[in-house]
Amino acid sequence: MSLKELQNKVDNWIKTCGVRYYSELTNTVILAEEVGEVARIIARKFGEQSFKNEEEEKSADLGDELADVLFVLVCLANQTGIDLTDVIEKNLEKKTKRDSERHKNNPKLWEK
């Protein structure tokens, strides 16, 4: 599915199941909360922290939490009139101009 299709699908879901978009402020706070849930799972699966119990570990679904982050991000884009396809293309162009040689020349990236 393209970003445009995703934006349309989320918009349709909001209008049919969600009643309306939350305010931009509320969605920004929800986004922070969802990113925190991703960070919690990453810290426990790939970092030094451990899960509190077996049940918590079983319910830790990184993919589902990443989807929650993406959903809220798409909501914010939709309600602020941002075409994600357009802005990601511009962003990649910017990064390519700025960073195409920088990362290749960074010895820290070659150490692992």
Image (spheres, grey):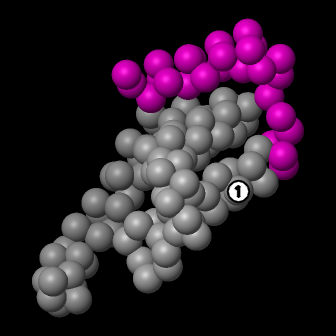
At label 1, the amino acid type is Glu
Query: Is residue 76 toward the left or the right of residue 109 in the image?
Result: right
Query: Is residue 8 toward the left or the right of residue 79 in the image?
Result: left
Q: Position of residue 10 (x, y in %)?
A: 61, 23
Q: Quadrant of residue 102?
A: bottom left
Q: Nearer the viewer, residue 65 or 56?
A: 56
Q: Nearer the viewer, residue 75 or 19?
A: 19
Q: Residue at x 50, y 41 (%)?
A: 64
Query: What residue occupies the far top of the structure in this picture?
Result: 16
Q: Which residues are magenta?
A: 1-26
Q: Quick check: 49 above or below 12? A: below
Q: Residue at x 78, y 54 (%)?
A: 29
- Magenta span: helix, strand or loop, mainly? helix
Q: Position of residue 111 (x, y in %)?
A: 15, 88
Q: Residue at x 58, y 70 (%)?
A: 52
Q: Quadrant of residue 89?
A: top left
Q: Nearer the viewer, residue 44 or 102?
A: 44
